[in-house]
């Protein structure tokens, strides 16, 4: 039974493509503008939004779209369980975020990361994970964190 089925008169769940389109339009972005900012083709984005894409987008593609829209992955995936209150941000992550001046959306995304039920326990591990995510998504590491990681 879906979580929406238990709520009387709840609208059906929105597809990821329709959610992307709705968020894009709310931000006043064009299809080409979002595609360029997310580093994907306009045709692929159109296929996603229209529901004709024959494959699921990768996590990297979704991350790039969320980043380009200025929303969290939780917002993009419509997963309210992924939303983390500021009080739930581990102290080590909060310290890393302050040192490296991370955007709030990135902190919220990182706060949901756990491995075997536990969050990283040091600023250095948070920095490593953050840079690994940015590197795997084709983005340059945050300038401050790259300098801090290399000691420059």
Image (tube, helix red, strand yellow):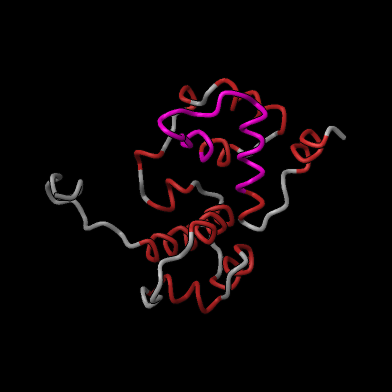
Left or right relative to 111: residue 125 = right
For the point 50% across and 72% down, which residue is it? 45
Q: Which residue, as the protein is rendered here, is positioned at the far right?
A: 152
For the point 49% across and 29% down, which residue is it? 119
For the point 14% across and 51% down, which residue is it? 9
Vertical comparison of 61 with 85: above or below: below
Counting every numbered tag in the picture gives 0
Vertical comparison of 34 with 47: above or below: above
Judging depth in this view, the residue of 118 and 70 nearest the camera is 118
Residue 54 forms part of the magenta stretch: no
Query: What quarter of the picture does the C terminus occupy?
Result: top right
Vertical comparison of 142 with 62: above or below: above
Q: Give the percent coordinates (x, y) of residue 115.
A: 46, 35
Q: Which residues are magenta?
A: 109-133
Left or right relative to 23: residue 134 = right
Q: Give the percent coordinates (x, y) of residue 62.
A: 49, 58
Q: Give the percent coordinates (x, y) of residue 13.
A: 26, 57
Q: Give the percent coordinates (x, y) of residue 15.
A: 33, 62
Left or right relative to 123: residue 73 = left
Left or right relative to 13: residue 85 = right
Q: Which residue, as the protein is rendered here, is positioned at the far front?
A: 116
For the point 15% across and 45% down, which residue is it? 7
Where is residue 124, by image quadrant?
Answer: top right
Vertical comparison of 50 with 25: above or below: below
Judging depth in this view, the residue of 31 and 92 nearest the camera is 92
């Amino acid at each position: 039974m879906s979580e929406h089925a238990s709520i009387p008169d709840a609208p059906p769940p929105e597809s990821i493509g329709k959610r992307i389109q709705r968020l894009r339009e709310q931000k006043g972005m064009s299809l080409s503008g979002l595609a360029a900012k997310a580093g994907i083709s306009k045709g692929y984005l159109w296929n996603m939004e229209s529901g004709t894409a024959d494959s699921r987008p990768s996590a990297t593609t979704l991350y790039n779209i969320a980043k380009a829209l200025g929303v969290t992955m939780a917002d993009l995936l419509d997963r309210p369980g992924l939303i983390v209150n500021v009080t739930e941000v581990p102290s080590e992550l909060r310290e890393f975020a302050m040192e490296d001046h991370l955007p709030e959306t990135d902190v919220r995304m990182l706060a949901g990361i756990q491995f075997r039920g536990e969050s990283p326990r040091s600023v250095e591990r948070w920095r490593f994970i953050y840079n690994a995510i940015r590197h795997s998504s084709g983005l340059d590491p945050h300038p401050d964190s790259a300098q801090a990681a290399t000691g420059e």
